[in-house]
Image (spheres, rainbow, N blue to C red):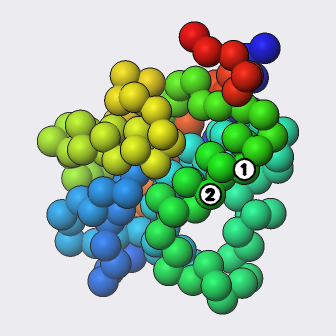
Amino acid sequence: MARTGLGFDSHRFAPGRPLILGGVTIPHDEGLAGHSDADVLTHAVIDALLGAAGLGDIGQHFPDTEERWAGADSLALLRAVVELVGAAGHRVGNVDATVMLERPRLAPHRDAIRVSLAAGLGVAEADVNVKATTGEGMGFVGRAEGAAALAVATLLDASRRG
Ligand code: MG
């Protein structure tokens, strides 16, 4: 039986930080603030996987109050979560995500992000889709105060192929 999970995350823009999305460092004059590397897209994907598996959320597994997760590479956290859901009897079917940010334009980086996430998830690139949209000047995304991401993941029974 297939299981579906939803993930959402947002982080504030801050100067002097790298902008990392889906494990890819995007050239920009500021980045996202957070306890980890603040990879908002990967965090949304992690929560989608945990949601599909019924395993809670990212904060339960990697609390931002714990020093060992300071500056954490979110792609490494993603791989740990893929192992966790695998141990629970699931394998990743597909992931679809939307990044919401006003700038920079993500189109030039979309393929690299897809490749990076697919590697972290252990699936084919065809099983990962990344979309981007702006806030049309509205709200915290539109004012470029921060970026947000939504993700949906499908998990399949690990004992079945196809
Ligand atoms: Mg986060």
Query: Mark 1 CB in 8 Å range of ligand 1?
Result: no
Give the left or right position of residue 15, taking residue 138 as reference.
Answer: left
Up/down of 67 relative to 29, above or below: below
Real-space Cα separation, disc 2 to disc 1, in angstroms: 6 Å
Query: Residue at the spot x=40%, y=51% of the render?
Result: 22
Residue 105 position in % (x across, y down)? 21, 45
Residue 38 position in % (x across, y down)? 49, 67
Query: Residue at the spot x=57%, y=83% of the render?
Result: 70
- What number of labels is visible? 2
Q: Which residue is mark 2?
A: 80
Up/down of 28 relative to 68, above or below: above
Q: Which residue is mark 1?
A: 84
Up/down of 136 relative to 27, above or below: above
Residue 53 position in % (x across, y down)? 78, 37
Up/down of 9 relative to 51, above or below: below
Q: Secondary structure at mark 2?
A: helix
Query: Residue at the spot x=76%, y=63% of the render?
Result: 61
Name which residue type carries label 1.
Leu
Give the left or right position of residue 40, taking residue 81 as reference.
Answer: left
Q: Secondary structure at mark 1?
A: helix
Instruction: From the viewer's side, name the closer residue of 73 and 18.
Output: 73
